[in-house]
Amino acid sequence: MSFKAEPLRLSTTQADFEPRFQQRLHWAADTDAAIEQRVADILADVQRRGDAAVLEYTQRFDGLSAANMAALEIKADELKLAFDGLPAAQREALQAAAERVRRYHEAQKKASGESWSYRDADGTLLGQKVTPLDRVGIYVPGGKAAYPSSVLMNAIPAHVAGVGEIIMVVPTPRGEKNQLVLAAAFVAGAHRVFTVGGAQAVAALAYGTATIPKVDKITGPGNAYVASAKRRVFGVVGIDMIAGPSEILVLADGSTPADWVAMDLFSQAEHDELAQSILLCPDAAYIDAVQREIDRLLNEMPRAEIIAKSLTGRGALIQTRDMAEACAISNRIAPEHLEVSSRDPHRWEPLLKHAGAIFLGAYTSESLGDYCAGPNHVLPTSGTARFSSPLGVYDFQKRSSLIEVSEAGAQGLGKIAAVLAYGEGLQAHARAAEMRLR
Amino acid sequence: MSFKAEPLRLSTTQADFEPRFQQRLHWAADTDAAIEQRVADILADVQRRGDAAVLEYTQRFDGLSAANMAALEIKADELKLAFDGLPAAQREALQAAAERVRRYHEAQKKASGESWSYRDADGTLLGQKVTPLDRVGIYVPGGKAAYPSSVLMNAIPAHVAGVGEIIMVVPTPRGEKNQLVLAAAFVAGAHRVFTVGGAQAVAALAYGTATIPKVDKITGPGNAYVASAKRRVFGVVGIDMIAGPSEILVLADGSTPADWVAMDLFSQAEHDELAQSILLCPDAAYIDAVQREIDRLLNEMPRAEIIAKSLTGRGALIQTRDMAEACAISNRIAPEHLEVSSRDPHRWEPLLKHAGAIFLGAYTSESLGDYCAGPNHVLPTSGTARFSSPLGVYDFQKRSSLIEVSEAGAQGLGKIAAVLAYGEGLQAHARAAEMRLR
């Protein structure tokens, strides 16, 4: 069977560019009222009945029966066996990737995750203490889209942050365990692993059951049920982001081999029919060359059908007036992954304001970042890079302000606070400040 | 009229301490289905009809009519007039507070909000670029609880982060403007101010209207409608936290004058009948002394009725076995405000893991921190300090990963990525990496 990928071809000089561009970008998360209600019911049931409810849903949705929740825990020795049983190349690749991811996140912690303080001349101390979360839950999807790399990308920053206990949940439909996922849990150092998934797993982590400990935060991707459940338990626990379909934007000046760029567009498209791959380039002939490589390479790909659907349905090859315009459009999109496939990427990087991750230069394929360059592959999607950040050590830490006002400091501050507190009609606030005046 | 405040008296040595302690702590945000539905309708209507809908709701809910949205904007000169019209003491207090808050948040930005990067031996660059949000919305409550200090605490960190445009919304029921709030907007440098509030203001900021620009993130406290609206637009824009009632926990070793501690408990209780003030102390005689000061001081307070209701309904004076046990209980509570009212606060501070802000020593009344010590007064409530942080510069910034793989680096990384990508069944990822191999 032969597939054809026909991404939308646009030029910013077209009169109808704006509406066509907007339409192609548009994606809205469906909120399905039926799913919402079922998730609400599952959460309430797990909160009420604990393990018994989780067992029941696991049987119903994953076709997996167990006598009790303890039987659904994968113990450390089984994780190690999974790792030991892998081919050497996979073992080494997992370990090398983990090592680089760890090193990057250690640098991140050092750069932005340490406590700090200073003292005023009067001896008053001000600062912020940074501490790890006590216990976190990591949701790892099972079945078709089981990604061991996601285990590393969630668990390692938690470890580096100093989280006391990392509880991983992964559904194993009909009991089928993915050995690479288990091996990744071993390498990343998950403390406990339970083979449960869906809204019931999120509920168990958020509320705790007799067997599954209550966590402080839940991270990791999942299907619509998992996303809905995470949104609902937000506040009871922390959550990371709610991810939409994955996206890549390639800014190309025409200096990178066209087949490299075509394959980079594929690497996003192969995730999912809703994934979005966009090329922005001022050079029409280069865009033609990329389209030719798409045509040439597509049917070599095992996932050609998904790639074709994704590129045809949501992809775009856009000719811009110049690279500066391409950068401006990129800022409007705020893509999850942004490749600057240019001879001179550092010329353009300062113009790029919003993106989850920026891949500079022809050798930096997104896939290197997905697995092993070091930075996290959990990134903000659907334009949320305008206001949110890659998953990082900071997601597994929290901060407490530190204030120690000296007796001398209390004299000046007390007067200011009293004036403002009386102005707000909060007299006890004012009196508390005034009592510290000499 | 005379009031009486009777906080619950407990001791950790009582047999029934645990259930009584749990019951006193318990607080759950009501989710009112009627409010939820009305908010959903308002959001949809503002999204559809823009300014016209906002004007209509402002008329209906705030009793404020205007010919058009432009008439609801307060221009810079009116903000300055409000500031100029204040008594000198208020002007100076606002400016002094703003200056200290700015200085603290500048230190915060320097400590944890700067871009960083490093290079591997093979020339590969890894790092993170930190950039400000383009535009944020600050919700400031109006009416009874109009707090100019909250304007400073939201707008200044946004300014320090480098946010391009700060849009403030504040309801002015029946057109009554709070001059201190306007003056605070002037001092803090809000770029535009609109006198709208409620779910309609949140909707306008999240979706944009012809007059009110769409923002990237909305911060600031509000009533149940505002909280529900923020929760619903989360994902379209970023939001800060959803705050519960305010709380103070005082750990006392008995060395602070008992009337100071009593007034500190009042200063939380006076906010709201649902506010929670708790004292933990190993010294029964000292707890008695604090209760006597509560009795003595209560009826001097203009807000005695609220204080009495809050302390009686939700307050507690708890005798612990020792200070270490008090610290352990504090960690279970994860309070918003934590006073360590001790002769030797640095002995206990390292034991305190979860709190929004930690106030060290007898001179550090919470009220100094609320107004002018420097750290932010927007803090995690209801135990969410287990996983979240004070509002800060970091809330108005986002991060982008930076990756530049050298040709040499691509050789090693490409092999690792290809092994893992094939393991996950993502062949285009693998091929993209392999194409960069020599």
Image (spheres, coloured by chain):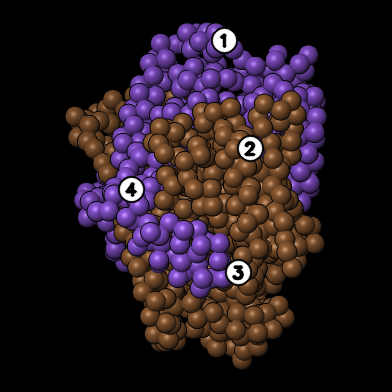
Chain colours: A brown, B purple
Q: Is residue A299 left or right of residue A259?
A: right
Q: What element carries label 4?
A: strand
The residue drawn where x is 48% and y is 77% is A180
Q: Earlier in the sequence, mark 3 or mark 2?
A: 3
Cα–Cα gap, marks 4 and 1 = 50 Å
Question: Where does the image place residue B159, in percent across and percent down from the top left?
Answer: 44, 27
Mark 1 is on which residue type?
A: Glu
Q: Is mark 1 on a helix, strand or loop?
A: helix
Amino acid type indicated by mark 2 = Ile
In the depicted view, which residue is nearer to us: A324 or B176?
Answer: A324
Q: What residue type is labelled 3?
A: Ala
- Mark 1 vs mark 3: same chain? no
Q: Name the residue under label 3.
A: A145
Q: Are marks 3 and 2 in contact (CB under 8 Å)?
A: no
The Cα–Cα distance between marks 2 and 1, rounded to whole angstroms, is 46 Å
Which residue was labeled with disc 1? B78
Residue where numbered disc 4 is placed: B125
Mark 4 or 1: the one toward you: 4
| Spatial CA span between label 4 and label 3 | 30 Å
Q: Distance between the residues labelled 2 and 4?
A: 29 Å
Question: What number is the disc on residue A318?
Answer: 2
Q: What element carries label 3?
A: helix
Q: Depth check: B219 or A359 in front?
A: A359
Please say if the residues under marks 4 and 1 sit with CB atoms less than 8 Å apart: no
- Looking at the rendered structure, the kind of residue marked 4 is Leu
Crowd class of label 2 (few under 14; some 14 to 19; many from 20; radius 10 Å): many
Tell me which residue sits at (47%, 41%) in the image: A255
Viewer-side label of 2, 1: 2
